[in-house]
Image (spheres, rainbow, N blue to C red):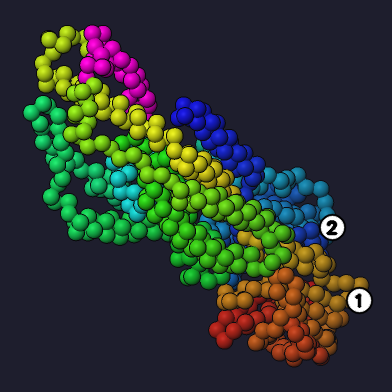
Amino acid sequence: MTQTIAPRVRTLVLLLLAAACALLAGAGPASAHAAVTGSDPGQGAVVDKAPARITLTFSEQVALSDDSLRVLDPEGKRVDTAEPANVSGTTYAVPLHSGLPDGTYTVAYQVVSADSHPVAGAYTFSIGAPSKTSVSVSGQSTDDGVVGWLYGFGRYVSYAGFIVMAGGAAFVLACWRRGSGVRPVQRFVVSGWVALTASTLALLLLRGSFTGSGKVSDIFDLSLLGQVLQTKSGAALVSRLLLLAAAALFIAVLFGAYARPSPTTTLTDGASLRQPDPREDAEEKRDLTFGLSIGGVVVAAGLAASWAMSEHASVGLQAGIAMPVDVLHLLAVAAWLGGLGALLVALYRAPADTPVDAPAVRRFSQVAFGSVLALIATGTYQSWRQLGSWSAFTDTRYGQLLLAKIALVVVLVGVAWISRRWTGRLAETVPVEAPAVREKERVGAGAETAGDVDIAVVGDEEVPVEGEGEGGSGLDTDEQPDSERAAQLARQQAARDAARQKRMRDADPNRFGLRRSVLAEAGIAVVLLAVTTVLTQTEPGRTEQEAKAATSAAASSSADTGASGALTLNMPFDTGGEDGKGIVTIDVDPARVGGNEMHVYVERPNGRAFDIPEVKVEFTLKAKDIGPLPVVPDHIATGHWSANGVQIPMAGDWQVDVTVRTSDIDEVTVSKNAQIG
């Protein structure tokens, strides 16, 4: 039966791995997690005179380099004069040469968002009138190409390695301690450690090129590596490597503690009996398990925190809560999926004399059930935090991937329920026969085994073993010492016992059904991990909707002055507190010298009006050293304030500052320049 199942198992596993790789390959370059929510001049805008600087506003804080913001003239020459700098909050600016001629200019940006992902793009604006330009604004993404693919694959391997290592070790410690001496299970856990260590080193080398030029030649640039080590992502990767050293020590202790050989006594006929070790009493085992449990949880939580401290959870809404929730979520995933992989290895590869028993499977079922509950709780919070609205489930790529992940989890839970039913009906494996019984049977059957061929289990393979006859031993019976012959007979009998037990174990229909259902679970888990990896590289739905709303507002008011002479300014804001993001719109009519009517509208990123405690507006004409001229509008309706008789004393390029306060302590001032008069 084993020989029949094995090819099917290998084929199914290969198909599942191919599906996961196809999913990763078809995902395309990941969207940036920080989005441009505003710019001045805006995309496609035509301004009358050359601006003194270019400003970009992002949905979150970003890291800048010397070439993060570049402004190119129609011939492709740079016209920015200094390094970019942060001017306020999430707004960044770069100064320009004075007296720029008319034509179309290109603004190219390449920064790193606060959650460690690169942000790259470009847009154009024109001075005077549009013109031809020799600058190409396509292909700006650094996560495209070979380096981007390698970095994405490295992230997948790192997640898989952590899950295999942490979940496999948890399965041994919490569910099946006898498995600490099973070589296939040991190889499974150690392979997870190796995969995580190798992928972490690779990510550390790839990081500089991934967030910079995207060139393969820059992977081994030591200067870039030095810059990476000074970033939050570099610190997280280095911390992960240090914790992996502690994990190696933990794994060594785990596999040595429960697998220490007991002292043996040699009988007069050469056979050996294993004697119990008096030191390994129940209290010692409890202390050992407690110490390993505490150490394992600390190391695993630290490794999980290396992701939380540098990615989605570390920025945005409620970061102080989101980071520990993210750690708990990743630990629950590892306990469930990693333990599932270890169980699969035990069911298929454990030797006949050390089979995984029903109590171990039942204990894992309880661990998996608790992990699923933790995943539901933490996943619900993460979904709310990253989406923000029900519409984001279907309107954003992040939401669509999250729906796919939820569907896979539901299917996985359904298959796990089937496995739970098989576990309840799992027949216990036939116990290993006592040494005395085996010795008696061996002596009685010694003559009958001469020249026979039986099946022995060597490692993980079944091999034929010849009997002790004239053609089997190579020595005549009279020439062989009694002790040597007895030892040889004992080995052959042990091999036959193991082979018989393996056949009996594999013939159990309940165990066979459990193996198939667990294999199906593992296959779904591979695809689920691929979807999760792509999800962590995708722009959150909340950010994507805010960027769409800001872009839509900018497009609707690309020309600040309409036919009637009214002025409309749209400015995204983020006070940093709860419910602190939105868009404030200023309407000034007729936007000329003298009295004007001003309306202020405050909307959420999804376009819904909402009230805030305070809105203040100031007008400043820096060229003439006039202002700031404060205006405090009156509240008219939900999200609407108004003021009449706003006096503009002189025509010019006025700076409009709007102070938005969303709570007693959370407020921000956003600014935009506009021609009035």
- Image position, residue 61 (x, y; %): 56, 64
Does 444 sit above or below residue 48?
above
- Which quarter of the image is occupied by the C terminus? bottom right
Does 310 sit above or below residue 88?
above
Residue at point 81%, 90% (across, down): 644
- Image position, residue 193 (x, y; %): 38, 44
Name the disc covering residue 564, or none.
1
- In the image: residue 397, left or right of residue 674: left
Does 439 sit above or below residue 102?
above
Quadrant assignment, res 113: bottom right
Label 1: few (<14), some (14–19) or many (≥20) C-alpha neighbours in 10 Å: few
- Image position, residue 478 (x, y; %): 12, 10
Name the disc covering residue 129, or none.
2
Q: Which residues are magenta?
A: 446-472
Which residue type does callout 2 highlight? Answer: Ala
- In the image: residue 472, left or right of residue 218: left
- Image position, residue 289 (x, y; %): 27, 56
User: Outermost residue toward the right?
Assistant: 563
Q: Secondary structure at mark 2?
A: loop
Q: Does residue 457 show up magenta in the picture?
A: yes
Which residue type does callout 1 highlight? Answer: Ser
Q: Secondary structure at mark 1?
A: loop
